[in-house]
Amino acid sequence: MKKKKLKNHYVDRYYKFISRIKGWEVMQLNEGWLYYDSPYRCYATKIKPSDLPEDYMNYWDGNKQNYLKTSGVVDIVYQPVINNHVFRDDSLYISYTNKIKYKIKDERLDKSERFTKWIDVEEKDYNNCERIWGGEIIEFLLMAEKYSGYDISSIKEQMWNKMLLLKKYEPETYNSQVKDRETFDSWFNLERFDYKNKK
């Protein structure tokens, strides 16, 4: 049997608003077949979740269930945002082909918008990058470390530096959710995510 060539990013189920009484329901796309989600279009495949190897990360983003490859990662750029939460607006730019070219567009720290740095990725790289947000960041980094051999130490330190800014400007959030470096380090354990159904 010919081996299926797999892409980086697939979409499966999604949430659909039915009515005010019924609320939201999980809908199945394409009778169980996955959709390939590219920067330019989304199209049906003949691949099911069970066809994906263990290096695909299963996560929900907004109203869609996604499967994102964590092997073959070439470069990762971390975009931190300082607000009254830990990771919700943070994101990762992920490249499977080349180093990501970017500039530090702005560095500011004021009352309304507190960015440690604002990443301006070049348009060509931006269109070729995958992006992941919020609470999924740590799991992706750990899986990229495992399946791509990617060194996440510098990104981890960038994330800790953000925690220190959080401690300074949002101490209530820091004290209730982060607390200290030991707690922060304990988050970087892939076993924390074993509860997730990978398929």
Image (spheres, rainbow, N blue to C red):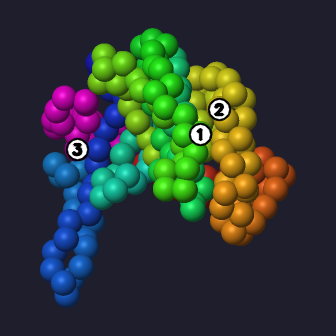
Q: Residue at x 69, y 49 (%)?
A: 165
Going by the numbered disc 3, the residue's amino acid type is: Trp
The part of the chain drawn in magenta is: 33-53
Alpha carbon distance from label 3 to label 1: 41 Å
Q: Residues within 10 Å of mark 3 (few under 14, many from 20)?
A: some
> Which of the 4 image quadrants contains residue 7?
top left
Going by the numbered disc 1, the residue's amino acid type is: Thr
> Which of the 4 image quadrants contains residue 80?
top right
Q: Residue at x 67, y 57 (%)?
A: 169
Can I make out residue 188 in this image?
no
Label 3, secondary structure: give it: loop
Q: Residue at x 36, y 46 (%)?
A: 66
Q: Residues within 10 Å of mark 2 (few under 14, many from 20)?
A: some
Reading the image, the residue beneath label 3 is: 33
Q: Position of residue 105 (x, y in %)?
A: 46, 27
Reading the image, the residue beneath label 2 is: 155
Query: Which one is earlier in the sequence, the residue at label 3 or at label 1?
Result: 3
Give me the disc on residue 186. none
Looking at the figure, which quarter contains the N terminus? top left
Going by the numbered disc 2, the residue's amino acid type is: Ile
Alpha carbon distance from label 1 to label 2: 13 Å
Reading the image, the residue beneath label 1 is: 116
Is label 3 or label 2 in front?
Answer: 2
Instruction: Work out whether 85 lies above or below 123.
Output: below
